[in-house]
Amino acid sequence: MSRHDCYTCGAPGAMQAFKGRSLSVSFKQLTRMVHSLAGHECTACAEIEFDAPSAERYARAGDELIEDAKRVMADEMKRIRRKLHFTQKSAVQLLSGGGHNAFSRYERAEVEPPKPLFVLMRLLDRHPELAQELQVINACDDINALLLQKEQQRLGEN
Ligand SMILES: [Zn+2]
């Protein structure tokens, strides 16, 4: 059984072989398990050093998770937009602002949607009736009323 010193903490002969271990890879809140991993683990500091095939599988699982997660988020953006009967253009006007092709880029997984937008889309997926409020919210009558108050306060002070 090969035992060697830990490269991280330097504990002598502390690296102990393991195999058949399952560990997770994660990206944001998303996780996926990788099974049957083998390598060495430090009994002093818990540093893990995978064998070459396990290191490759673990790294590939991480890359695949990121790729799959981006694709799934992009597909969700498209599915929910269509469910709400928005064009990409109206979705930009009502929801995201930014460039006219912002939604097109999110839906092609070219850019990840900002978290507040992704959360908003998922809320609207659960409560699509709230989409009716978007025209009124975007018209900003309530905010304009608040601005008017501010203006009157200022005039009152002078
Ligand atoms: Zn160590």
Image: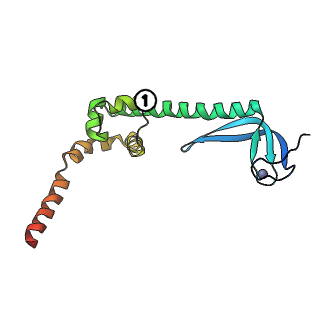
> Which amino acid type corresponds to the residue marked 1 in the rendered image?
Glu
Q: Nearer the viewer, residue 8 or 57?
A: 8
Residue 113 is situated, as x and y percent measured from the top left of the image, at 41, 38
Q: Residue at x 16, y 54 (%)?
A: 144
Residue 20 is situated, as x and y percent measured from the top left of the image, at 80, 37
Q: Quadrant of residue 122?
A: top left
Query: Could you classify mark 1 by the number of other residues whose Cα lies within 10 Å: few (under 14), some (14-19), or many (20 or more)?
Result: some
Q: Nearer the viewer, residue 27 or 30?
A: 27
Q: Nearer the viewer, residue 155 or 123?
A: 155
Q: Residue at x 82, y 52 (%)?
A: 43
- The answer to whether residue 40 is left or right of residue 70 is right
Q: Which residue is mark 1?
A: 110
Residue 23 appears in view: yes
Furthest residue in direction bottom, as rendered: 157
Q: Nearer the viewer, residue 118 or 114?
A: 114
- The answer to whether residue 32 is left or right of residue 103 is right
Residue 22 is situated, as x and y percent measured from the top left of the image, at 74, 40
Q: Quadrant of residue 104?
A: top left
